[in-house]
Image: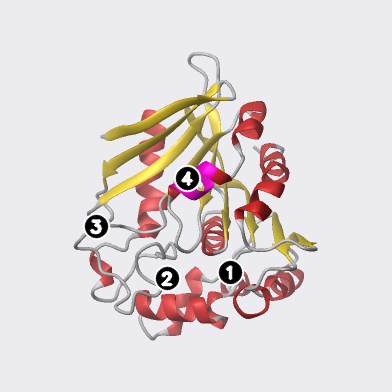
Amino acid sequence: MIEQVSTTNSHGGVQSVYKHASTSTGTEMTFSVFVPVHAPGSSLPVVWYLSGLTCTHANVTEKGEYRRACADLGLIFVAPDTSPRGEDVADDPTGAYDFGLGAGFYVDATQAPFAQHYKMWTYVTEELPCLIGANFPADLDRQSILGHSMGGHGALTIALSFPSRFKAVSAFAPIVAPSQVPWGQKALGGYLGADQAAWRRHDSVALIEDGARVPALLVDQGEADSFLEKQLRPELLQGACERAGIELELRLRAGYDHSYYFISTFMEDHLNWHASRL
């Protein structure tokens, strides 16, 4: 059962926020959903958006500027939270922003104390799609996924793991090879343990090296992004795609950073790209 937190009209459709008791995480979870105007009894394709470090559903909902495009294209847009939350949910003991609350990395943790609640892979790939299918006019045979930064990592790894489910995948400034960068090494080690073999199914470059395929990828990356060289490293994805024969459109955007000013600028481009495949 889901409980409506807020709802408002926008571009002829309805933007809402809901909460529910999650069976995956054992916590209350919140998500936002935009549903365009549609004919009674009809169903619409679903675009999933996964957010980055420190974010909740609210960042893209308030700053993403996706509603007009989704209304024009007839797309449901769903944005979940980035981690479980609550008083009994484990967090980084140092209070760092890149691990723990707000930084679930879209994995199912196996290491204590995070394994109890950090089940974001199951939440995003199993539980939430069932809720969306049961409560909204969603055509789950037409799904696509995109994300930003940590959420770009999540979108890429999920699409590569479920290639028959998602008709399109794209990302803004994704963490493409978490096994090879500090953000990912900290998160995957903390959630999954020291055995790096377990990390590979949550690393886009490693998944491609191990045989995962999608027809095409779209990635936008700001050249003025302060995280570009140390944490994001899109050249690693480019090399993996070239070796695997995956069509990658990597667009380096001069002057753009890691913020929602960047994301909102190119959001319509991404949604048009998704709609053409849905």
> Element type at marker 2?
loop
The residues bearing labels 1 and 3 have C-alpha atoms spaced at a distance of: 26 Å
Q: Which mark is residue 175?
A: 1
> Element type at marker 4?
strand
Q: As rendered, which of 51 and 1 lies closer to the eye?
A: 51
Residue that numbered label 3 is attached to: 86
> Element type at marker 3?
loop
Q: Residues within 10 Å of mark 1 (few under 14, many from 20)?
A: many
The residue stretch that appears in magenta: 58-62
Q: Position of residue 266 (x, y in %)?
A: 71, 48
The residues bearing labels 4 and 2 have C-alpha atoms spaced at a distance of: 20 Å
Task: Determine the residue located farthest toward the bottom in the rendered image.
Answer: 194
68 left or right, relative to 1: right
Can residue 198 be seen in the rendering of this structure?
Answer: no
The residues bearing labels 3 and 2 have C-alpha atoms spaced at a distance of: 16 Å
Q: Amino acid at mark 1?
A: Ile
The residues bearing labels 1 and 2 have C-alpha atoms spaced at a distance of: 16 Å
Circles 3 and 2 in contact, beta carbons < 8 Å: no
Residue that numbered label 2 is attached to: 97
Task: Determine the residue located farthest toward the left in the rendered image.
Answer: 88
* Residue in view at x 42 percent, y 75 percent: 187
